Image (cartoon, coloured by chain):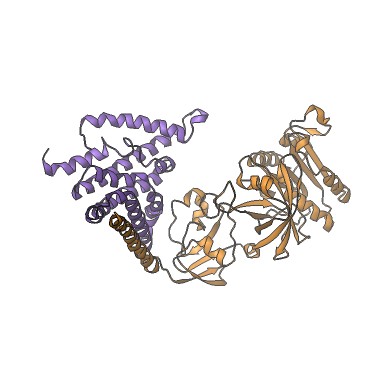
Chain colours: A purple, B orange
């Protein structure tokens, strides 16, 4: 594959073959609790796309311009979390100030995402896999879209589940985890197409 | 070695400090909504600092909106009507607000923030709501799982309420909870005793508040509560009264009956009390004493599942069946119900079959 096409490959791989939720099982807590409703899943999914893309950009700059030159790469866990938390807080404040519509649709979910491990995961993978700046952006965007697709699919399935007869002990998180596993198996079908990481 | 350590400490502190300063600046500029004016019921005006949720902002002005979860948006109790200044509905409010309520601009006050001048409508009775400091004067067992807790008010020293209302008890942080929680309990004592408030609290397995009351609370403890709340009180009519309660649903009915006895309200009244077996039955002597004081009052306890050794000769069966057996026509009747949602829904059905108008059936459902 040519060098310039690689970011595009990463983008699609992050959505399908290396879906952060279905292949790495990251970001499960909000996935399990919010996927009850289609409408809220939509809001949260879009918020995740936005935050993943922007924090992977920010953290790339922080890592390669500050941490690496100073030789303190091992502090990336702490620094990434601080950067994500501060960024999300700022964005929430700004959204709340400028647009009421956007806040109702998106801003309300931002605090939920601050502690989402998928967001941190994207920043850490980007370092492990030595992505360039452009690759990191497409990886962040792709992972966000992948997470969005997974939660939308789950919300759709759970709408149907409401009318299904589920064994008592499996109601709620139990059946959701089993279905997530099945979805992960289905997504494995894509893995012949592309490979990254 | 030392210098490497210094660099890492310096770098993390530097980044944190930079972001912290950024946040402080943002807080003072972007999130600063300045002084705003809240107008309540068209006449009372409050100048408050904007930027915080409405529920907390009102609490700072000593206006207490009932809320069981303490502002996390998980109980749906803190509803207020916001006529102006709240903006559009948030997804976190919608699960609690019906379409009719949306048409009337009913909002969840813990979710909406005060960002500009607002105009609210709050029931006048809530202005009577205050926060009270009290001491636990007495704790006694009514049954194997219901305790009676008597609180003696210290500040303010007196409470003014009507029989049947409830208060919200503040449970401090302890093993089961990291933050104080508030739970609503009906008052069981006669409000004419303005210095004491008595509650009946049934142990719910793993319940945060009930476990605290049953296993941690001691006589002499300090406690905080706020109130009074609720519109479950005796209407002044000449109609016949049906009371129905189960378990700790006894509390508000007992309060109403004590007040009726004191004021000499001698309307025809029947009180159906449902319990499983004799060990769940309590305050029977007190009810018999009230029967003597109120000649037209009759206490009808019913056991759904009496045990052999109970030697029970009273009514048996589900409370709904017992009520159906005793009632003739409900035309001239009003009903007061307190208990679990299941019991109340079943009883409402029986009462409406008997002809008690729905709008004259008042109830207090436990959450």
Residue at left offset 43%, top offset 61%: B87
Instruction: Give the side of residue B283 with respect to residue B367, left or right.
Output: right
Q: Quadrant of residue A66 in the image? A: bottom left
Q: Quadrant of residue B167?
A: bottom right
Foreground pick, B97 / B18: B18
Of B126 and A47, the residue lying toward us = A47
Which quadrant holds residue A25? top left
Picture coordinates of residue A137, whole percent (x, y): 23, 49
Examine the rendered structure and indicate whether residue B61 appears above or below residue B315: below
Q: Position of residue A186 (x, y in %)?
A: 31, 29
**Can you see residue B4?**
yes
- Residue drawn where x is 26% and y is 39% of the image: A15
Name the residue furthest front. Answer: B1
Q: Residue at x 77, y 36 (%)?
A: B279
- The answer to which of B64 and B211 lies nearer the viewer is B211
Is A169 positioned to the left or the right of A69 in the image?
A: right
* Number of marks: 0
Q: Residue at x 83, y 30 (%)?
A: B311
Q: Position of residue B149 (x, y in %)?
A: 73, 51
Side of B163 where B182 appears, left or right: left
Q: Specify whether residue B160 is in view.
A: no
Q: Quadrant of the image for the N terminus of chain B?
A: bottom left
Q: Nearer the viewer, residue B79 or B358?
A: B79
């Amino acid at each position: 594959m040519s060098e310039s096409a690689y970011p595009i490959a990463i983008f699609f791989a992050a959505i399908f073959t290396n879906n952060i939720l279905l292949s790495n099982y990251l970001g499960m807590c909000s996935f399990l609790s919010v996927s009850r409703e289609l409408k809220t899943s939509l809001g949260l999914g879009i918020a995740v796309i936005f935050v993943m893309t922007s924090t992977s950009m920010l953290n790339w700059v922080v890592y390669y311009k500050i941490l690496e030159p100073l030789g303190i790469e091992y502090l990336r866990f702490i620094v990434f979390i601080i950067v994500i938390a501060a960024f999300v807080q700022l964005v929430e404040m700004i959204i709340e100030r400028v647009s009421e519509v956007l806040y109702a649709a998106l801003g309300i979910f931002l605090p939920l995402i601050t502690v989402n491990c998928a967001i941190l995961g994207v920043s850490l993978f980007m370092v492990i896999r030595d992505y360039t700046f452009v690759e990191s952006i497409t990886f962040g965007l792709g992972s966000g879209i992948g997470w969005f697709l997974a939660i939308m699919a789950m919300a759709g399935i759970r709408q149907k589940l409401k009318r299904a007869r589920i064994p008592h002990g499996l109601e709620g998180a139990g059946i959701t985890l089993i279905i997530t596993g099945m979805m992960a198996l289905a997504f494995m079908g894509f893995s012949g197409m592309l490979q990254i990481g | 070695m030392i210098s490497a350590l210094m660099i890492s400490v310096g770098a993390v502190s530097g980044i944190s400090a930079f972001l912290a300063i950024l946040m402080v600046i943002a807080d003072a500029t972007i999130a600063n909504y300045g002084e705003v004016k809240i107008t309540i019921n068209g006449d009372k005006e409050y100048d408050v600092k904007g930027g915080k949720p409405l529920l907390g902002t009102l609490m700072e002005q000593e206006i207490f909106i009932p809320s069981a979860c303490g502002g996390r948006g998980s109980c749906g109790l803190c509803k207020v009507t916001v006529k102006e200044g709240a903006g559009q509905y948030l997804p976190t409010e919608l699960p609690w607000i019906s379409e009719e309520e949306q048409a009337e601009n009913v909002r969840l006050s813990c979710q909406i923030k005060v960002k500009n001048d607002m105009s609210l409508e709050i029931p006048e009775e809530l202005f009577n709501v205050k926060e009270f400091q009290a001491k636990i004067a007495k704790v006694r067992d009514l049954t194997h799982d219901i305790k009676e807790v008597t609180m003696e008010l210290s500040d303010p020293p007196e409470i003014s309420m009507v029989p049947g209302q409830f208060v919200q008890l503040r449970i401090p942080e302890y093993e089961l909870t990291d933050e104080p929680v508030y739970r609503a309990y009906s008052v069981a004592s006669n409000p004419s005793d303005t210095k004491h408030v008595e509650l009946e609290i049934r142990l719910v397995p793993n319940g945060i508040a009930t476990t605290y009351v049953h296993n941690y609370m001691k006589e002499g403890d300090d406690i905080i509560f706020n109130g009074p709340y609720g519109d479950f009180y005796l209407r002044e009519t000449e109609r016949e009264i049906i009371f129905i309660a189960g378990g700790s649903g006894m509390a508000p009915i007992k309060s109403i009956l004590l007040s009726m006895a004191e004021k000499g309200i001698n309307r025809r009244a029947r009180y159906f009390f449902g319990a499983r077996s004799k060990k769940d039955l309590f305050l029977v002597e007190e009810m018999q004493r009230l029967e003597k004081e109120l000649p037209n009052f009759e206490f009808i306890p019913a056991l759904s599942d009496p045990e052999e050794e109970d030697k029970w000769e009273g009514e048996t069966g589900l409370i709904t069946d017992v009520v159906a057996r005793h009632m003739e026509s409900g035309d001239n009747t009003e009903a007061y119900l307190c208990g679990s949602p299941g019991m109340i829904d079943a009883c409402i059905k029986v009462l409406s079959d008997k002809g008690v108008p729905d709008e004259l059936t008042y109830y207090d459902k436990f959450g």
